[in-house]
Amino acid sequence: MKKVGFLLLAVAILAVLDGATLTGAVTKIPKMPDKRQVSIEVIADSANTLSASVMVEPGTNARDLMEKLFQMEYADSGRKFVKSIAGFGPRRFKREYWSLEIDGDYAQVGIAEIRVEKSMKLVWRLVAY
C-alpha cells in the first residue's frame, strides 16, 4: 500500500512540474522563464586564463553580467573601452587591447550593446596591435 501511495504522490508531483493542474487546493504553477547559458573566457596570456559559465534570463546585458562576475576597469567614464578584467590588462610598454569574440566571431558592437537572447560564448583576448 505504501508503494501505491508513493507512486500516486510521484505522479502528482510530476504533473504539477509539467504545468498540469490538480483538482482541489493545488493551483497551476507558472513556468519559470527560460534561461540561457553564457560561457565567458578571459585570456590575458598563455599562463593567465579565467573562465565562467552561468545561466541568465534572456535580455540580460552582457556588460552588467561581466561586472557581476569580474572586476572591470574602463579607460573612459562611459565604460566603453575595457582597460582591465580581473586585474589583467595591457602590459606596460606593450601595444595591447582587449578583443571580444562572440561565438567565435569578432564582436561588431561593444559589450554594453550585447543582450543575451540565446546561449553564447564570449571570449576576451588581450591582443597586440
Image (cartoon, helix red, strand yellow):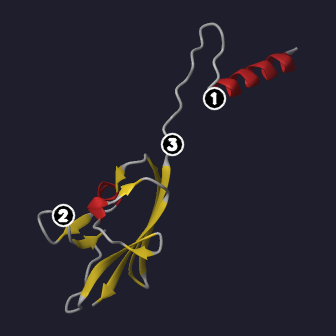
**Which mark sits nearer the N-terminus, 1 or 2?**
1
Type of amino acid at the residue the image marks with label 1: Leu
Q: Residue at x 19, y 68 (%)?
A: 74
Disc on res. 34:
3
Which type of secondary structure does the marked residue at label 3 adopt?
loop
Kindly report which numbered mark, 2 or 3, lies closer to the viewer in this rendering.
3
- The residue beneath circle 2 is 79
**Which mark sits nearer the N-terminus, 2 or 3?**
3
Q: Residue at x 27, y 90 (%)?
A: 129
Contact between marks 1 and 2 (CB within 8 A): the answer is: no
- Measure how far apart labels 1 and 2 are at the Cα level: 42 Å
Disc on res. 129:
none
- The residue beneath circle 1 is 17
- Measure how far apart labels 1 and 3 are at the Cα level: 14 Å
Quadrant in which the N terminus appears:
top right
Dividing the picture into quadrants, the one containing residue 76 is bottom left
Q: Residue at x 33, y 85 (%)?
A: 127
Residue sitting nearer the eye, 105 or 72: 105
Q: Residue 77: percent from the left, percent from the top? A: 11, 64
**Which mark sits nearer the N-terminus, 1 or 3?**
1
Which type of secondary structure does the marked residue at label 2 adopt?
loop
Q: Is residue 25 left or right of residue 36?
A: right
Q: Residues within 10 Å of mark 3 (few under 14, many from 20)?
A: few
Kindly report which numbered mark, 1 or 3, lies closer to the viewer in this rendering.
3
- Measure how far apart labels 2 and 3 are at the Cα level: 29 Å
Q: Residue 126: percent from the left, percent from the top? A: 33, 81
Task: Examine the rendered structure and indicate whether residue 12 appears above or below residue 127.
Answer: above
Which type of secondary structure does the marked residue at label 1 adopt?
helix
